Image (cartoon, rainbow, N blue to C red):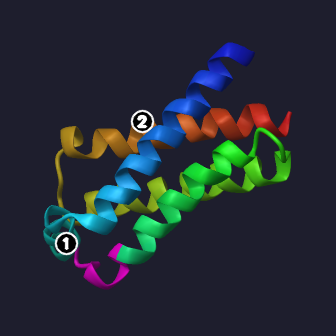
Amino acid sequence: MQTAFEIARALSAFAFLFYGIVCLSTSRMKVEFERYGLARFRILVGVLECLGALGLLVGYFNRPVLILAAAGLMLTMLLGIATRIRIGDSLVRTLPAIVLLILNAFVLGVAIT
């Protein structure tokens, strides 16, 4: 279980750091956030994703930070899934958010037990 937890935490940290940087720095994500109707939140989302990734890493030394980061990233993905449903995106386009929600739910579940 510990190995799966560490793999899940590392994958999530990498994915959110990557997506956060992409969200903050690419014109493609500017267009995507306009499509979502959430252009004014793009920078906030990118910063929160980067902070969540860093929180997962800081969680190696501070369990409450790990719990907060995993819960925050879960909430971010839950809102992302809701947004994709609202705009009528396909399951394929929604799947990354679903996978990251499940991954962080697992991290959170293990972290609080």
Q: Which residue is drawn at 30% across and 39% down?
A: 95
Residue 12, x across and y down, in percent: 51, 38
Secondary structure category for the residue under label 1:
helix
Examine the rendering and report whether any part of residue 102 can be seen.
Answer: no
Height in image: 106 above or below 4? below
Secondary structure category for the residue under label 2:
helix
Residue 75, x across and y down, in percent: 55, 59
- Of the residues tagged 2 and 1, which is closer to the observer? 1
Queried whether the magenta region covers residue 37, the answer comes back as: yes
| Quadrant in the rendering for residue 25 | bottom left
**Type of residue at label 2?**
Val
Residue at numbered disc 2: 99
User: Which circle marks residue 30 in the picture?
Assistant: 1
Q: Which of 99 and 61 is in front in this view?
A: 61
Height in image: 41 above or below 87? below
Q: Residue at x 76, y 31 (%)?
A: 110
**Type of residue at label 1?**
Lys
